[in-house]
Image (cartoon, rainbow, N blue to C red):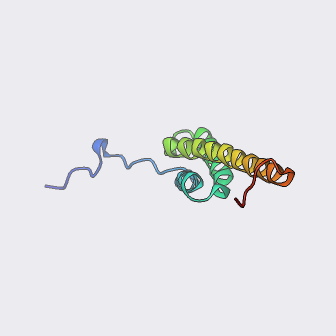
Amino acid sequence: MPPGPAFPGGQAPTPNAPGAVPALVLGILGILLCGLAAPFAWWQGKSAENAIASSGGRYGGKGMATTGKILGMVGVGLMILGIIAFIVLIVLGASGDINLTN
């Protein structure tokens, strides 16, 4: 007797869209380690979402692409806040309002 199908319904799983996994990885890196990865996660996630939308069901991985895009957006926001905080500290330190050296 031949073996049954390897997947339920006899169909192979839908492959992830190009860029879905890198978007997720870059998004995680952008939040945890390096804010510079965040804009690339945002861009990669948006590109993967566009590929999924135009594929007619040939690609999956929408959840990974969307999560990477959102993490990228959050990472960019945090990076901008960090830059603003840095500039404020420099300006306040230069004006003598705060003493950074104790």
Note whether 18 is above or below 77 in the view shown.
Answer: below
Residue at image coords 70%, 59%:
102
Residue at image coords 56%, 59%:
33
| Nearer-the-camera pick, 60 or 64 | 64
Residue 78's spot in the image, x, y percent? 65, 45
| Nearer-the-camera pick, 56 or 62 | 62
Residue, far right: 95
Residue 75's spot in the image, x, y percent? 63, 47
| Nearer-the-camera pick, 18 or 23 | 23
Residue at image coords 50%, 46%:
64
| Nearer-the-camera pick, 37 or 93 | 93
Image quadrant holding the N terminus, namely: bottom left
| Left or right of residue 22, residue 47 in this image | right
Residue, far left: 1
Q: On the image, which quarter does residue 101 sit in? A: bottom right
Residue 45's spot in the image, x, y percent? 61, 47
Q: On the image, which quarter does residue 40 sit in? A: bottom right
| Left or right of residue 47, residue 1 in this image | left
Q: How many marks?
A: 0
Residue, far front: 102
